[in-house]
Image: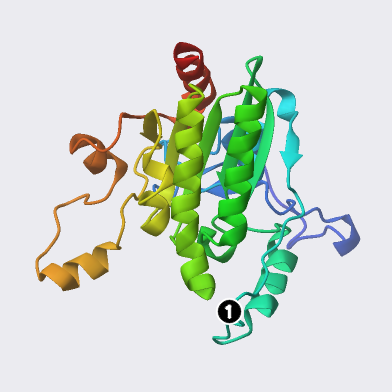
Amino acid sequence: MSWFVRKDKGIQTPTEMKREAPDGLWYQCPNCKKIMNTREHKLNAYTCVHCNYHEKIGSDAYFSLLFDENEFTELDANMQSADPLKFVDTKAYPDRVKATIAKTGLKDAVRTAYGPMNGLVVTAAVMDFNFIGGSMGSVVGEKIARAIDHAIENRTPFLMVSKSGGARMMEAGFSLMQMAKTSAKLALLDKAKLPYVSLLTDPTTGGVTASYAMLGDFNIAEPEALIGFAGPRVIRETIGKDLPKGFQSAEFVLEHGFLDFIVDRKDLKDKLVSLFRMLL
């Protein structure tokens, strides 16, 4: 006979005494589906402790990972898009911008700042995919151009973290002009003999790949990041053939000579500072 006998049947705890786990306490990896503590995931640079999957993160997370004690000064923080073409699709472009600002708390698809990384002052531009797919409009190009000007004036290295679906169709030609503008500014940075490292994250595509993302003294990427110009579906339909396995992954691009190396996000800060000090 069992020594333990339950005398009362059912749950007896009053409703007001019940405790629920707070939201956001656990994180499930979308790749391996395993569960981990959210704090552990954050301390692991937003990478899975089981399979090393690199979660897509925005400028806030990159700034906290890269700048010492998350101390930085943001540049041109309040710059917002105009509506040069009076563009309307399912909604007017200004309305789409306002709705995205309200939803994300971001002013546009890139944030720029400067601050210390392991004691070395660096100027950085970090893109946010949550703002209209990280699309490159006039504000994105202007903020990056001004950040490069700041790097030249203050003799700091420049870091670009790209995460974008490409040009912003709502600005058409104005968006495409940003490719030339940012490339010209990077030529001035090179003339000033200041280092530029371009980090390509998941995804980096379109006009961003065709301009500043591929113009670094070092072009590096996070593991398994999607990197390309046109999307895989468009290429497949154009050439009428199946694409190689892993096509447009960072590993595929590295193998074919378009990247210098792939860096784990947990090692990113130390690797960047080493590169900058080597190039200065």
The front one of 52 and 141 is 141
Residue at the spot x=64%, y=84% of the render? 92
Residue 38 quadrant: top right
- Give the percent coordinates (x, y) of residue 227: 33, 49
Q: Where in the figure is residue 154, as x and y percent of width and height? A: 67, 24
Q: Does residue 37 sit above or below 108 in this rendering?
A: above
Report helix, strand or loop for mark 1. Answer: loop
Provide the residue designation for mark 1. 85
On the picture, is 236 further left or further right than 48?
Answer: left
Task: Indicate the position of residue 275 as horizontal and vertical percent values.
Answer: 45, 18
State the residue in front, 164 or 185.
Answer: 185
User: Tag count in the figure?
Assistant: 1
Quarter in which the N terminus is drawn: top right
Q: Is residue 259 left or right of residue 243?
A: right
**Residue 109 visible within the image:** no
Viewer-side residue, 249 vs 42: 249
